Amino acid sequence: MSVTPEPDQVEPPPPGQAVRVLDLVLRVAGGALAAFGGVLTAVVELVLAGVRVGGHLIGVSVPVVIVANVALGWFAHVTVGRRWAVVLPAVPWFGMMVVAAGRTDEGDVLLSGDNWVGLAMIVAGAMTFAVLGFRLMLAPPARTDT
């Protein structure tokens, strides 16, 4: 009888302090990058909201907002490793949309109430983040085979 455990039963050593610190730094950096991405995509989408062809709004920002918000939500969830991470790009994105819908001291408005593209963009972006968050809440917990 051997006292040496079988190779399948050998547990890996616990991660060292340096590995845990590096993991934490990468998660924080990923979360910060996701939040910055929320601001950046909001600015790009606001610029694209006014694109016209032949004097008519074409709505190119609506599909862009859906694709960008799905990508940002996925990136935040994967890099941070937590389900709540989808709020990291969502909060700055919503903040930018609120600021864009408000009137400045000079009377300028980036998203006006009569601009169907701006309204569709806000609804599509909000629904995208809501669906992502809802799907993450309903997802079964990750299995850890030990």
Image: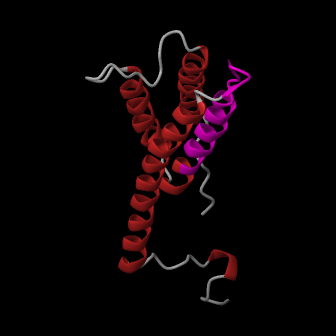
Front residue (pair 54, 89): 54
Main SS of residues in magenta: helix
Image position, residue 122 (x, y; %): 53, 22
**Which residue is nearer to you in this view: 9 or 30?**
30
- The residue at the point 54 percent across, 40 percent down is 44
Locate the N terminus by quadrant.
bottom right
Residue 96 visible in the displayed image: yes
Q: Nearer the viewer, residue 110 or 9?
A: 110
Task: Report whether residue 85 is seen.
Answer: no
- Is residue 112 shown above or below 133? above
The relative height of residue 145 versus residue 85 in the rendered view (above or below) is below
In the rendered image, residue 136, in percent from the top left (x then y), is placed at: 57, 36
Q: Quadrant of residue 139?
A: top right
Residue displayed at 51% across by 49% down: 76
Is 71 a magenta residue?
yes
Q: Where's residue 20, x and y in %?
A: 40, 71
Vertical comparison of 91 with 76: above or below: above
Q: Residue 109, position in %: x, y?
A: 41, 21
Residue at the extreme right of the image, as rendered: 54
- Could you tell whether 104 is left or right of 54 in the image? left
Verify whether residue 48 appears in magenta: no
Q: Which residues are magenta?
A: 52-75
In this picture, residue 11 sits left or right of residue 64: left
Nearer-the-camera pick, 7 or 27:
27
Residue, x 38% and y 31% (percent of image)?
95
The residue under the point 43% across, 43% down is 88
What colour scheme governs how the chains and residues are painted in the rendered image of this protein? secondary structure
